[in-house]
Image (cartoon, rainbow, N blue to C red):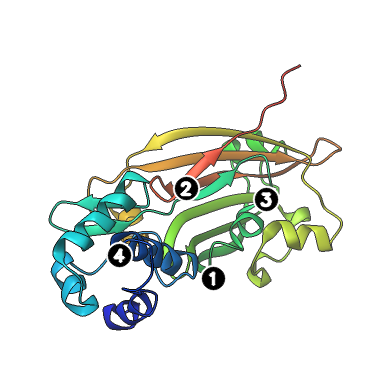
Amino acid sequence: MMPQPLLEYIKARLNAEAPAPLYMQLKQAIEAAMADRLLTHGSILPSERKMSQALELSRVTVVKALEALQEGGRVIKRHGKGTEVNQPVSYNLASGGFSAQLQHAGTLSDRWLVREKLAADDVLARELEIAVGDRVAKIKRVRLVDSLPVSIETMFIPARFLPRPDLFEGSLYAHWAENGIFPDLQDYSLTVHVPSAEELSLLDLPHGVPLMKITLKSRNAQGDVLEYGTAFCLSNYFNFDFRVKLQ
């Protein structure tokens, strides 16, 4: 969102006659802009000087509001960059796929890189528990939330569970549900990943930013492997949650 419409949105929520201090009103107005998705994760707020002038507030009031937001973890001060909105998305690895969990985080879209079938090599045959040479669907895409690239996903699927990858769109799990295929057991591993130049470019990241690598294998109730692959995720965008039942 451009600064001027954002500042107009915030200014409309300030009232000098209200009992609440102006710095608290400004804090709450900025939080409202976050809730209404006028500000999203990684957005840069206008400078203190610009907010002070446009909102007709003292610099001290603006500074106090930003300090309160920073104390609550809602923003982060970046040297040489400004004040950045911090709204990481909670992602429960035990609660379904990307599309289902992030549908309320913003507008989801995909930048497709690969949708093809290939013959399983030794590694894929072992991971998917199929024969070498069996047909496998490969899908690779950049996943975006509100046009922000947040992960690179590469999955390998036995062709009987995705016979036409070239026609596939959207949520894999929703597609499977429509065809009576349901993941029952999922194995994950998480590691820190140093991205390649290509991965940095795909996610529009500067050099030196680490990613979280998730390796996934899922099975149906009959024990068949449905998918095997990886996702490289922005480590500052997701909070990965787990729920474990102890026996």
Q: Earlier in the sequence, mark 3 or mark 2?
A: 3
Q: Label 2: few (<14), some or many (≥20) within 10 Å? A: some
Residue at mark 1 to residue at mark 2: CA–CA distance = 16 Å
Residue at mark 1 to residue at mark 4: CA–CA distance = 33 Å
**Tag of residue 238:** 2
Depicted 160 relative to depicted 222: above or below = below
Asked if the residues shown at circle 3 and circle 1 are in contact, with their CB atoms under 8 angstroms apart, the answer is no
Under tag 4, what secondary structure? Answer: helix
Asked if the residues shown at circle 4 and circle 2 are in contact, with their CB atoms under 8 angstroms apart, the answer is no
The percent coordinates of residue 55 (x first, y second) are 24, 76
Residue at mark 3 to residue at mark 2: CA–CA distance = 25 Å
Q: Where does label 4 land, which residue? A: 22
**Tag of residue 157:** 3
Residue ID at (68%, 59%): 172
Residue ID at (46%, 69%): 37
Q: Where does label 1 land, which residue? A: 107
Residue sitting nearer the eye, 148 or 215: 148
